[in-house]
Amino acid sequence: MSKPHERPRKIAIVGATGAVGEVLLRVLEARNFPVGELRPLASERSVGTTIRFRGETLPVELARPEAFDGLDFVFFAATGELSRTLGPEVGKRGGIAIDKSATWRMHADVPLVIPEVNGAAVEKHKGIISNPNCTTTPFVMALEPLRRLSKLRRAVVTTFQSVTGAGLPGIEELESQQRAIHEHRPIPKPEKFAGQIANNVLPLCETFRDDAYSTEEVKLLFETRKIMDEPAFEVAMTCVRVPVPVSHSMTVLLETERPIAPDDARRALAAFPGVIVMDDPARNIFPTPADATGRDEVFVGRIRRDLTSDRLWLWVVGDNLRKGAATNAVQIAEELLRRGLR
């Protein structure tokens, strides 16, 4: 006899043809999520295309309120505008929306969840649960094991973010520019990014605010505080776009109330679910985006004490399409099932 959480559920993916939507389909298959019915949904320009799921070809339908009738879960892997207009419709029809966009993350009534860190927050949902930003998730995953050793005070972070953080248009722009360079042609005018990304780095992700911080940067501060329920935790940050296809990396300089020895940090990180420590400098062992791509774990290395203080240095890498988006979303649904909330 099957267990209640194994009962087939009816789900939809809004944005099923996008970068995160495609990975969501693979993650649902790989994790054997109990999908009884799958409805791939998208905006008008993708209607009529098809996706493949568990050996079947399914037509993509228009994302509209009526498409959510009778569903258990709706994964939003599309634009913030679709999440804003359609997200509340899911709850009205008895389902739960799990949204990867920034639309609902800082809304007081919407839980912002990383299941390994604050899984119990799903119990407070009112029809929508938000997925953190793809940089916030690996950052918090690396912080949480250390927070359990000593209270967090401050972190200084520099991120190195892959082009798929901007979706399929990001990887298409990088590849187009790389081809032009290889063929000795003029580089096409950038459309997705603020400047040339091939053979270059851009100290900007998304757009600048009036205070000269980018919208991507402030997410690291405010989302981290909400997830960890640490309103006084200080995060100073710079986000950089780099010509890497998949996986975000970051340096973290962490200050805690009680200094944490590097060996203690390694043990705590290695014991935490979803974290892998790769840290042997003498043998050139440390995580890179290539190591993390296609994996659900967050990788941590270069763990060392700062030369001028008792603070701790970390190097953190995670696949922005998997744990940074799709995998975390599926884990949220699994957490709801585990707690009998669906």
Image (cartoon, rainbow, N blue to C red):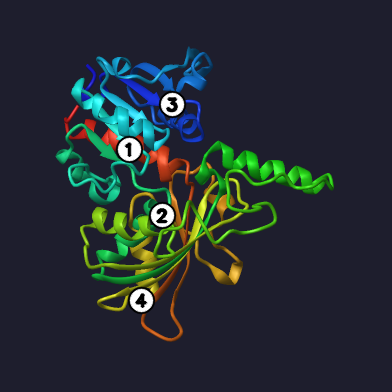
| Disc ID at residue 215 | 2
Neighbours of disc 4 within 10 Å: few (<14), some (14-19), many (20+): some
Mark 1 to mark 3 CA distance (whole Å):
13 Å
* Nearer to us: label 4 or label 2: 2
* Nearer to us: label 4 or label 1: 1
| Disc ID at residue 331 | 1
Q: Residue at x 35, y 34 (%)?
A: 330
Mark 3 to mark 4 CA distance (whole Å):
40 Å
Kind of element beneath mark 1: helix
Q: Which residue is mark 3?
A: 29
Mark 4 to mark 2 CA distance (whole Å):
34 Å
Could you tell me the amino acid type at mark 1?
Gln
Rendered image quadrant of residue 211: bottom left
> Nearer the N terminus, badge 2 or badge 1?
2
> Nearer the N terminus, badge 3 or badge 4?
3
Could you tell me the amino acid type at mark 2?
Thr
> Nearer the N terminus, badge 4 or badge 1?
4
Neighbours of disc 3 within 10 Å: few (<14), some (14-19), many (20+): some
Could you tell me the amino acid type at mark 3?
Glu
> Nearer the N terminus, badge 1 or badge 3?
3
Q: Which residue is mark 4?
A: 261
Mark 4 to mark 1 CA distance (whole Å):
31 Å
Q: Is residue 78 left or right of residue 128?
A: right
Neighbours of disc 1 within 10 Å: few (<14), some (14-19), many (20+): many
> Nearer the N terminus, badge 4 or badge 2?
2
Judging depth in this view, the residue of 269 and 147 nearest the camera is: 147
Kind of element beneath mark 2: helix
Q: Residue at x 36, y 65 (%)?
A: 267
Q: Residue at x 60, y 46 (%)?
A: 245
